[in-house]
Amino acid sequence: MRISTLTLRRWHRRFALTLGIFFIIQGLTGAIAQQRFWLMQASDPSGYRVNARGEPMAPGSVVALIRRNKPDFQIAHMMYPAAVSPNTAVVVMGGRDTTKHDMSRMMMIDQFDGRIIREQSSMSGWVGTADALHKWLIFGTAGKIILTILGLGVMIFSGLGLVIWWRTRATSKNAKGVVRIHRTAGLAASLFIISVSATGTWLNLTTWAEKVSGRSVFTSNMRIADHADMTTAAPAISGDTAYEIARKRVGDEHLAAFGPPGPHAKNYWFAFMDDRLKRTDVLVNPANGRVIGVYPTGLTSGGGGVRAWLFPVHSGYIIGPIGGLIYSLIGVSVSLWVLTGFIMWRQQRRPRRARGTAAALTEVRS
């Protein structure tokens, strides 16, 4: 049974009105998350911009710096800047509540000068908020469910748009103005949107399942301990030594994140990225320097194959950093595309309203 183009247009319009705001939020927050290191520097240069020269401090040296100057600060983990933005400060997450894995505070560290720039609440900064909003983390489990439903809706919406474009390609050759912009932008963006929505929804579901099952290497390395049972002794293997051990196992990849052993972590944890943002985690025993495991995609199992490529495809980094930039620009342009669709809807709605008003007046007069 063939569904008429008119019916498809009606459903396409309904999806558009429902998903328009979601489109704008995800497009803009995704672009912000993608370019977060540049944006953090631009919005707060005194806090995040550093003078990149020479070799940056290894993670163990950063830990030692904090323990000398802020001995009561419990380090949860630290995030190193992307390879394309070496002049961004290292961000250390943690806090002072020793009864839990506290991440209420964060420090910015100049990894070249070896100094603490400042400490602030981890909730500070619009860039981090946008990143959390893009993943709907602030809404908890409900956010995961809603994000999945909306992601599926976006794929259906984009598929309808492609079918409508194909059916009307001959009759719309002379389309002008907003209609032409919308059709051209829609064709260019639909395949991108379907790809990003599909991989994003897949990532949302898999990371959710991985967190629940405990397959995340970072999460599994944490342990819930009683206050009296917390680890306080210095590890036999230093953080810098553990870092060199881990690097030998992954080759020439960029350090993205690091977590030291401590009150709620059994081992040294390292997350590395290649130039396509394929991730590899390494755990190193702090007592003897033994590599406990090398884990694709940061998972204790099932991190290889298609799963390893989901984020590179979703972010555009499957073709390298230039792909990430292109995806960011397209993500912003989605907002313009949604706007042109809304204008078309308004323009088409006015004549229908006018005809309905005229018909009502005629009926009253008769």
Image: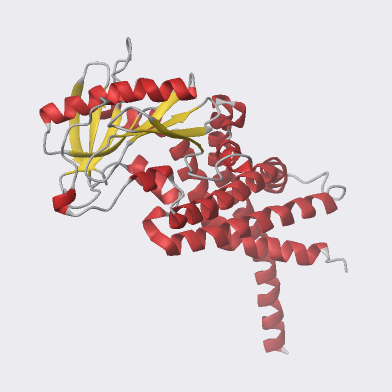
Establish if 279 lies above or below 22.
above
- Give the image location of residue 194, x and y in percent: 66, 48
Question: In the figure, 63 relative to 340: above or below?
Answer: above
Measuring from the top left, give residue 189's x and y in whole percent.
66, 42
Point out the image quarter for the N terminus.
bottom right
Pick whichever, 262 or 293, lies toward us: 293
Q: Quadrant of residue 353?
A: bottom right
**Residue at (31% x, 17% y) in the render:** 56
Q: Residue at x 23, y 52 (%)?
A: 225
Residue 149 horizontal/vertical position (percent) = 57, 62
- The one of 151 and 353 positioned closer to us in this rendering: 151
Number of numbered discs: 0
The structure residue drawn at horizontal position 77% and vertical position 46%, both measured from the top left corner, is: 175
Q: Is residue 294 shown left or right of residue 223?
A: right
In the picture, which quadrant includes the C terminus?
Answer: bottom right
Q: Quadrant of residue 89?
A: top left
- Residue 111 position within the rendered picture, expressed as x and y whole percent measured from the top left: 27, 21
Q: Quadrant of residue 336?
A: top right
User: Relative to the observer, which residue lies in front, 194 or 285?
Assistant: 285
- What residue appears at the point 59 percent right and 29 percent down from the top-left corner? 323
